[in-house]
Every structure is written in C-alpha cells, then in structure tokens.
Amino acid sequence: MSGLKRRRLPRLTINRLVPNALTLMALCAGMTAIRLALMDRWQFAIAAVVVAMILDALDGRIARLMGATSEFGAQLDSLSDVICFGVTPAILVYIWALGDTGGLGWALALVFVMACALRLARFNTALMAEDPPPWASRFFTGVPAPAGAGLALLPMIVSFELGSEFFGSAAVNGITLILVSALMVSKVPTYSAKRIKLPPSYVGLALIVVGAFTAFLVSTPWVTLSLTGLAYLISIPISANSFRRLQVAAERGDVLPTQGNDTEDHDTA
C-alpha cells in the first residue's frame, strides 16, 4: 500500500470559498424547510426552498465571475442539490399530503429522491463527455432538479391561494410526484435559462421584467410562484419543439446561431 498516494485537495483561496459558502447556505435552507414542515409552518417551509433555489442559482455565476470554479465546488453543489431539491420536497409532500397513505406514499417520495439523484448523476457524467453542438447547449436533458422541486411543490403552493381540499389530496400529490420524477429522468429537452443571451437592446426590458417579478414575488408570493410553475410547464413542449426544429436544421446543414457552451459550470442541473 506504500505505493499508493492519497490525492490531496489543493489549498483554496478566499474567493474560491465564497461560492462554496453559498452552496452550504442553500443546503442549510433546504434542511430548515424540513424543520419548518415538521412544525406545520408550511408557507415558511416553501419560502426556505425558494431561498435555496436563489442561492443555488447564484453560486455558479459568482464562481465564474470570481474565477473560482472548481471540481470540489461542482461535487459539493450536486450533493447539496440532492438534499435541497430531492430529499426536502419529497419529505414536505409526504408529511403534507401522503402521510396517511402509509408505505405507498413513502415509496412515491423515495422514487422522487432517486429520480433527482439519477438526474444529477447523468448531468455530471454528461459534463465529462464530448461537448454537444453549440445550438444544443441552450437545452437541458430533462427537467433540472430545482425546477423539479418547484413542480413537486406546486400543488402545495397553489393550495395557499385556492385551498387544500383538492390540491392537498394524496391522489393529486402522488400523481404529481410520479410525473415530475419521470420528467427529471426523461430525455425531454428543456430550456436552460442560464445560457440564453439577450441582445443589448433587450437588457433594459429584461431588468424591468426581473424587477416586476421580484415586486410581485414579495407582494403576492403564492400567486406569483403558481403562475411561474404553470409557465414553466407550458415551456416544456415549446422547448421540445424548438429542439426538434434546430436538430432538423442542423441535419440539413443549415447555419445556426451559437450560444456558447458552459460546460465548465459550477452549477448542476
């Protein structure tokens, strides 16, 4: 065994620790959501999951801006995502709607967690494979883990405005978990927002839209989150159709606009 050398992690500078700190903060938010659910504080639990999503969206971008991308950060991000967007939504839905179904409800929760883990493992493996064509880099394969968590919690979010008699039923939430699990491990192309580049003339409009979304999220959070979830569901068939059109055009040899490929990304999907 003396011939074997232990691989040591390189020393990390302070700027490389900032994105990892955000990832750990997201992990803490996800775990806190479970604690809040155990206390029946459901709206605060959903808010904690949203905070985890925001931090997860920021850590990779900050890592690239600071030149702090690393393999360590990517692996930490994946482990955090499994808990925040796999374990946490599954436990929340189980406690909220599936607890009375016994083993069946728990099995559905386990299926969702496994689907999230498989989705992240496939994404990490794809990063090591050959680069996709530039036009394909603007799409994910399947629903990303944060979006899957949001869709799994969508019935609960809608119930905050419309009541839980229907949206809190075990049937609705069980079917939702099954469908979202299938979407996460599927090969359905979905838009990758982080790789969409806007022309300079649209930057001002985009900032206004982001500001308006933030204002609505603060003033009417559950309506805003519900509409956002429904809008994402509508975008799935649109993105699949867009992918097929680009694929056919590429096979014909047409010249397609490129978006660039962010394979060296601290984020996971």
Image: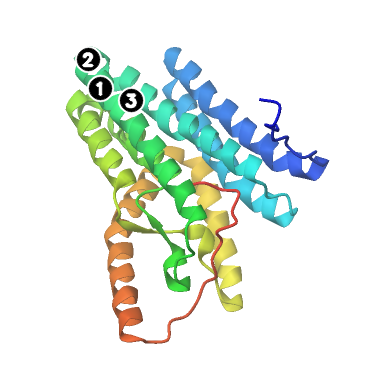
**Image location (x, y in percent) of residue 157:** 36, 34
Q: Give the numbered dot on residue 107.
A: 1
Q: Secondary structure at mark 3?
A: helix
Q: Amino acid at mark 2?
A: Gly
Q: CA distance from mark 2 to mark 3?
A: 14 Å
**Image location (x, y in percent) of residue 260:** 55, 70
User: Would residue 269 be visible to someone looking at this image?
Assistant: no
Name the residue rendered at 50%, 44% in the picture. Answer: 217
Residue farthest left in this picture:
171
Q: Secondary structure at mark 1?
A: helix
Q: Give the numbered dot on residue 93.
A: 3
The quadrant holding residue 107 is top left
Name the residue rendered at 49%, 31% in the picture. Answer: 84
From the viewer's perspective, is 127 left or right of 153? right
Q: Amino acid at mark 3?
A: Val
User: Would residue 219 be visible to someone looking at this image?
Assistant: yes
**Image location (x, y in percent) of residue 186:** 29, 49
Q: CA distance from mark 2 to mark 1?
A: 6 Å
State yes or no: discs 2 and 3 in contact (Cβ < 8 Å). no
Name the residue rendered at 59%, 78% in the picture. Answer: 201
Name the residue rendered at 45%, 59% in the picture. Answer: 192
From the viewer's perspective, is 199 left or right of 227? right
> Quick one: label 1, few (<14), some, or many (20+) residues within 10 Å?
few
Q: Amino acid at mark 1?
A: Ala
Pair 2/3: label in front: 2
**Image location (x, y in percent) of residue 191:** 40, 60
Q: CA distance from mark 1 to mark 3?
A: 12 Å
Q: Is residue 86 above or below residue 141?
A: above
Q: Quadrant of the image for the N terminus?
A: top right
Residue under label 2: 103
From the viewer's perspective, is 24 left or right of 206? right
State yes or no: discs 2 and 1 in contact (Cβ < 8 Å). yes
